[in-house]
Image (cartoon, rainbow, N blue to C red):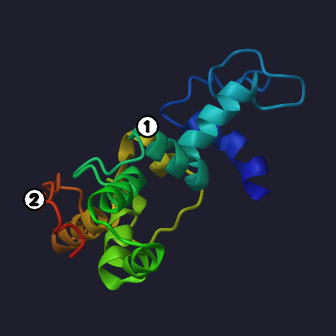
Amino acid sequence: MLDDLRYPLQAGRCAASAWSGEPDRCRWCDGLARPGEAWCGHRCEDEYRRNHWWDHARQAAAARDGGACVRCGLGPQVRTLARLLLRALIPMGPVEAARLWQGPAWRSFVQACELEVNHVEPRLGRGYQAGCHHHLDGLETLCHRCHVQVTSAQHALGGSRADVAAPAVPPPGEHGA
């Protein structure tokens, strides 16, 4: 992988890195690196990747945020609870339940519960290649609806962060409608 070759060399340029620049030192913590490696161990390599590689950073941000939208609290666990509550409170057979789960209202709810990870400082088409723009302190987990609202507000402000206000949380049953 190209990132495996390129980014350990650039890791020392990261503000979060403690690397002194010595070639035999870990690019993250500045401890003694393993012979022929850029890292002292897997912990530092993983920490670097969690803050610089999009696929790792996205998973780390979602885990840090408890698998839920940081603005409204929706997430996959809400979908599971809603399904259990509907089955418990509304008497229905398997055919009626299948129709409900395939209906447009349920699909809209499922989409609303899907999680996305947002760059607080917008990328504005600059891509997702590895780099410091994926630091965890610059990422937030949002549901689809909140992500659309935040992104729209950022674009309206000319693409700047400008501390976009959190969208109003709708009453139960109206999310994603």
Query: Which class describes the residues within 10 Å of circle 1: few (<14), some (14-19), or many (20+)?
Result: few
Mark 2: secondary structure: loop
Disc 1 target residue: 64
Q: Is residue 65 above or below residue 115?
A: above
Q: CA distance from mark 2 to mark 1?
A: 23 Å
At x 36% / y 48%, what residue is drawn? Answer: 68
- Figure quadrant of residue 54: bottom right
Q: Earlier in the sequence, mark 2 or mark 1?
A: 1
Q: Position of residue 41 (x, y in %)?
A: 76, 24
Q: Position of residue 17 (x, y in %)?
A: 55, 29
Left or right relative to 68: residue 18? right
Residue 120: in sight, yes or no?
yes
Residue type indicated by callout 1: Arg
- Figure quadrant of residue 161: bottom left
- Figure quadrant of residue 122: bottom left
Q: Is residue 8 above or below residue 100?
A: above
Q: Is residue 117 above or below residue 92?
A: above
Residue type indicated by callout 2: Ala
At x 16% / y 73%, what residue is drawn? Answer: 156
Disc 2 target residue: 168
The quadrant of the picture occupied by the N terminus is bottom right
